[in-house]
Every structure is written in structure tokens, then in C-alpha cells.
């Protein structure tokens, strides 16, 4: 299953890349869910991100590896691919894209693809994943500023 979320922010495209770091990721962790970062190598090809989640009764881990990092004058992107995922997830691919807005500022685009191996289970998991990633929009706007005008996503 695939879904995409786009957030427009005022932050300058040229400076935004350096602000995608552990500190930002900690702010973006699902509010209200017991999740912590246990390892963050960075955002270069081959780097890993390790998350630990749970409340004692149910716990697990998540390991993603960074790949496909790219940059040109209008876009910066990287992909995190699930290496170790909690059940019921069997595959995970999340492309993070920063796109220069023609009128200034940046679009932050999250392109997520996941599978549980079952369409029915995918449909059951989708609302939770969507809610987690939709909660990032207000955080991005708070950290990087809201655009003055409502720009259409790319």
C-alpha cells in the first residue's frame, strides 16, 4: 500500500537539509506512543536508524537503512528501507523529499510504501500509519514556519 503526504513550509530549501537530524526526528516521533531512538547514524547511504517502542507488555524494534540519497538544485531526498520491522509489517520504504517551492520555501513530501503481505491487514494498519505521518505536518510547520499562502503540493 502507498500513500503520500505533503507539507509546505517557509524554510529556505538551501538550509533545510542540514536541519533533518536526530533532534528533528525526536520531535517527529509519534506523539503519545512510547518510541525512542536507540541509534541514529545520520542520513548518508548505509546509515541506520534504530527505534525501540513499547510499554512493557508489548515492545519491539524497528531498523531502517538509508539509501538512494540524492540532491540537485530543486530537490534533496533519501529513502529509508525497513531492515527489521515489527509485526505485521513485512516491508517498508519511505522516501523523504524536500522540494524547492517556486514562490519560496519548501515542500516536505513523505512517500510511504508498506506491506504486511495481506491486503486486508494493510487496510487495517493504514489508518494508524497515516495518522502517525499526518501528525508530522503541524510539527514541520511549527519548526520551519508556515507559508503565507496556501501553495498546491507538487
Image: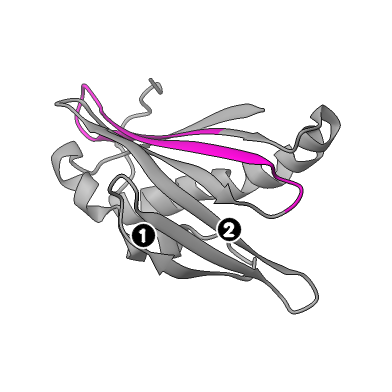
Q: Is residue 79 above or below residue 151?
A: below
Residue 96 highlighted magenta (yes or no)? yes
State the residue in front, 69 or 132: 69
Stretch in magenta = 87-112
Name the image quarter holding the C terminus: top left
Q: Position of residue 44 (x, y in %)?
A: 27, 48
Asked which colour scheme the image uses, the reply is one colour
Q: Is residue 31 above or below residue 144?
A: below
- Is 130 situated left or right of 81 in this image? right
Name the image quarter holding the N terminus: top right
Query: For the residue labelled by badge 2, is the local secondary structure a helix, a strand or a loop?
Result: strand
- Is 99 situated left or right of 125 in this image? left
Q: Give the main secondary structure, helix, strand or loop, of the magenta stretch.
A: strand
Q: Position of residue 74 (x, y in %)?
A: 20, 25
- Is 128 situated left or right of 107 in this image? right
Number of the label disc, if any, that sits on residue 24: 1
Q: Which residue is mark 2?
A: 62
Residue 73 highlighted magenta (yes or no)? no
Quadrant of the image occupied by residue 27: bottom left
Amino acid at each position: 500500500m502507498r500513500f503520500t503526504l505533503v507539507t509546505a513550509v517557509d524554510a529556505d530549501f538551501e538550509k533545510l537539509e542540514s536541519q533533518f537530524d536526530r533532534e528533528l526526528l525526536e520531535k517527529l516521533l509519534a506523539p503519545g506512543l512510547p518510541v525512542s531512538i536507540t541509534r541514529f547514524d545520520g542520513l548518508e547511504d548505509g546509515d541506520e536508524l534504530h527505534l525501540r517502542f513499547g510499554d512493557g507488555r508489548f515492545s519491539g524494534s524497528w531498523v531502517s537503512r538509508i539509501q538512494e540519497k540524492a540532491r540537485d538544485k530543486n530537490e534533496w531526498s533519501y529513502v529509508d528501507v525497513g531492515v527489521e520491522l515489527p509485526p505485521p509489517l513485512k516491508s517498508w520504504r519511505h522516501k523523504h523529499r524536500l522540494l524547492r517551492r517556486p514562490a519560496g520555501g519548501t515542500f516536505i513530501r513523505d512517500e510511504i510504501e508498506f506491506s504486511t503481505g495481506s491486503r486486508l491487514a494493510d487496510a487495517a494498519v493504514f489508518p494508524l500509519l497515516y495518522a502517525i505521518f499526518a501528525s508530522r505536518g503541524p510539527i514541520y510547520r511549527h519548526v520551519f514556519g508556515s507559508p503565507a499562502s496556501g501553495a498546491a503540493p507538487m
